[in-house]
């Protein structure tokens, strides 16, 4: 095992910020944690959706009944079960039912292309899908057994399947973009969820907490939104619509007295610009997913004060949140808003090569702790590259290389400095530009292509592609249709621009600014 070299100054700052150990339930899985919670809070409200309210006792009995049905159909510990259910109490019951069988839930979106979904099912060895009957997935995927998530008379049971689920078992699988054109399956252990929602330093999570589930369950923010409430005896309010409308968001927040809310950076900026008053009743406003706009943070501080706004950061591989920064002020000397310090039971290292960085030295952010994924499904080489073992002053650590560049301030706060590769985040979704480019290049009418990111006047990021076609018959609409059969909608460029050639810089690289200036600015999108 390699050792990281370090100066006394570098070791001191890292020891200071990594004093994050707090007790949390590391001996059982989410199944037992929820059942224990339900026994303590049997009549308390667990889930609210539109005009439906379910208690912990009701949710537990419904999940037991559905778990029995899954068990009869052959679901066993270690299996992966696809989950495609609209945001509803049935979704929560479905997730719990899968976990009660000792299996892992694998959420996906019905709008994703069939070829992509078949690849995900193959990687996860997923043979059963729990779904809304209206989605008619049996016709699309005859190779999978589709189990209905809704019944005229939902099955109930006081006890579900008798299985032992340990903290090291896999609870769920998320898929992220991959640079080779193949999505990466990220399995997350039960202990990683417990580490995220117990002893939280970034927000108060207890029986008096009401959390809003706004994220799709295929987005890892939902892990926090759902289990942050349901493992602590709090209430999880499910946002009633598929798309966020600010008037509806205000109604839901006020009516259900939501205390904690997570918003992606782009949505946070929209709220601050258009209707900042709708967040006025919240105890804690969490925001993250992309680099923050200082202008919007300053405006938010004016509206919400210095005690309620928290910036959070974390890759899927580390289970939702890895760092937090309570926003008290914006320092003009900082190039960006800090992403803060590690959350509970998480450790962070800034490393340049095999050297631990001292304050002010830029390096790659490496993360450690109970939140780390075991590695990527069926990708041993990529796992070996991104998850590494190192010794830090004689202490062995398993580390995840985030690919993010940053430096530590003298006070221990982390300042983000960008990516080492072509990965971007748009509306909280992680996108590898190489994956998008891979599928563009696979079209027979494409000779060359270049994919990049621009920023709209609203501050929202957008994907843009530039294409040198093989012939004059090329059309952006044909390419867009081609991408639609291979990529989810959020990965398809909003602008596809044909051009005679890709301009090059003096060093032979594609001249990104020249492309953006000539093709994008007139349409109201500015270079970033």
Image (cartoon, helix red, strand yellow):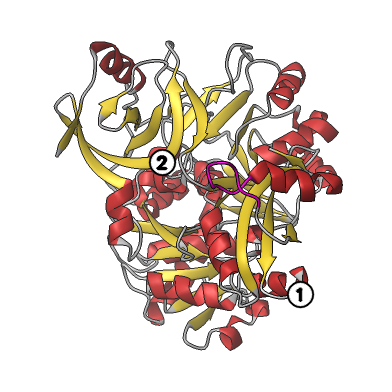
Q: Are marks 2 and 1 in contact (CB under 8 Å)?
A: no
**Residue visible at 66% across and 71% down?**
484
Percent position (x, y) of residue 11? 26, 17
**Residue visible at 41% across and 52% down?**
35
Percent position (x, y) of residue 137? 59, 81
In the structure shown, which secondary structural element does the residue marked by tag 2 occupy?
strand
Quadrant where the image shows the C terminus:
top right
Q: Which residues are magenta?
A: 503-511
Percent position (x, y) of residue 365? 39, 33
Residue 159 location, quadrant: bottom left
Q: Residues within 10 Å of mark 2 (few under 14, many from 20)?
A: some
Main SS category, magenta section: loop
**Residue visible at 54% across and 84% down?**
141
In the structure shown, which secondary structural element does the residue marked by tag 1 occupy?
loop
Residue annotated with mark 1: 472
**Is residue 506 highlighted in magenta?**
yes
Percent position (x, y) of residue 253? 74, 39
**Residue visible at 33% across and 73% down?**
76
Residue 208 appears in the rendering: yes
Residue annotated with mark 2: 402
Q: Image height check: is 354 above or below 78?
A: above
Q: Image height check: is 515 above or below 311?
A: below
Q: Image height check: is 166 above or below 506?
A: below
**Is residue 516 highlighted in magenta?**
no
Q: Nearer the viewer, mark 2 or mark 1?
A: 1
Q: Residues within 10 Å of mark 1 (few under 14, many from 20)?
A: few
> Looking at the image, which is closer to me, 139 or 270?
270
**Which disc number belongs to residue 84?**
none
Does 417 sit left or right of 376 as displayed?
A: right
């Amino acid at each position: 095992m390699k050792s990281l070299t370090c100066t006394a100054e570098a070791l001191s700052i890292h020891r200071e910020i990594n004093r994050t150990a707090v007790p949390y339930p590391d001996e059982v899985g989410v199944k037992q944690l929820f059942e224990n919670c339900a026994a303590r809070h049997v009549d308390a409200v667990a889930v609210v959706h539109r005009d439906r309210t379910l208690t912990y006792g009701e949710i537990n009995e419904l999940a037991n009944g559905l778990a029995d049905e899954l068990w009869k159909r052959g679901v066993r510990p270690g299996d992966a079960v696809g989950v495609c259910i609209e945001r509803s109490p049935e979704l929560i019951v479905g997730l719990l039912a899968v976990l009660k069988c000792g299996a892992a839930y694998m959420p996906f979106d019905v709008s994703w292309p069939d070829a992509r979904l078949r690849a995900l099912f193959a990687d996860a060895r997923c043979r059963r899908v729990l779904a809304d009957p209206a989605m008619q997935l049996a016709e699309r995927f005859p190779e999978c057994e589709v189990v209905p998530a809704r019944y005229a008379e939902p099955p109930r049971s006081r006890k579900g399947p008798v299985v032992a689920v340990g903290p090291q078992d896999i609870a769920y699988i998320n898929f992220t973009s991959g640079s080779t054109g193949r999505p990466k399956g990220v399995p997350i252990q039960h202990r990683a969820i417990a580490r995220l929602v117990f002893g939280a330093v970034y927000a108060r999570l207890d029986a008096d907490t009401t959390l809003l589930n706004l994220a799709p369950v295929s987005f890892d923010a939902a892990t926090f939104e759902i289990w942050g409430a349901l493992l602590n005896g709090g209430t999880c309010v499910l946002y009633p619509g598929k798309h966020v409308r600010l008037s509806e968001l205000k109604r839901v927040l006020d009516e259900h007295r939501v205390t904690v809310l997570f918003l992606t950076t782009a949505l946070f900026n929209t709220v601050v610009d258009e209707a900042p008053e709708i967040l006025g009743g919240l105890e804690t406003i969490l925001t993250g997913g992309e680099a923050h706009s200082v202008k919007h943070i300053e405006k938010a501080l004016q509206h919400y004060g210095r005690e309620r706004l928290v910036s959070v950061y974390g890759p899927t591989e580390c289970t939702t949140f890895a760092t937090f920064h309570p926003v008290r002020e914006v320092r003009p000397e900082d190039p960006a808003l800090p992403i803060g310090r590690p959350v509970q039971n998480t450790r962070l290292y800034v490393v340049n090569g095999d050297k631990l960085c001292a304050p002010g030295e830029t390096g790659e952010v490496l993360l450690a702790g109970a939140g780390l994924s075991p590695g990527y499904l069926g990708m041993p080489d990529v796992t070996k590259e991104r998850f590494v073992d190192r010794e830090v002053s004689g202490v062995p650590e398993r580390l995840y290389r985030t690919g993010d560049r940053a430096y530590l301030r003298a006070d221990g706060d982390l300042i983000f400095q960008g990516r080492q590769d072509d990965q971007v985040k748009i509306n909280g979704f992680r996108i590898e530009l190489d994956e998008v480019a891979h599928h563009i290049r696979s079209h027979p009418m494409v000779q060359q292509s270049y994919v990049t990111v621009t920023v709209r006047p609203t501050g929202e990021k957008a994907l843009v592609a530039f294409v040198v076609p093989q012939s004059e018959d090329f059309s952006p609409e044909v390419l867009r249709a081609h991408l639609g059969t291979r990529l989810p909608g959020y990965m398809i460029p909003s602008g596809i621009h044909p051009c005679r050639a890709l301009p090059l810089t003096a060093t032979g690289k594609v001249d990104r600014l020249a492309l953006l200036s000539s093709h994008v600015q007139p349409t109201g999108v500015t270079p970033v």
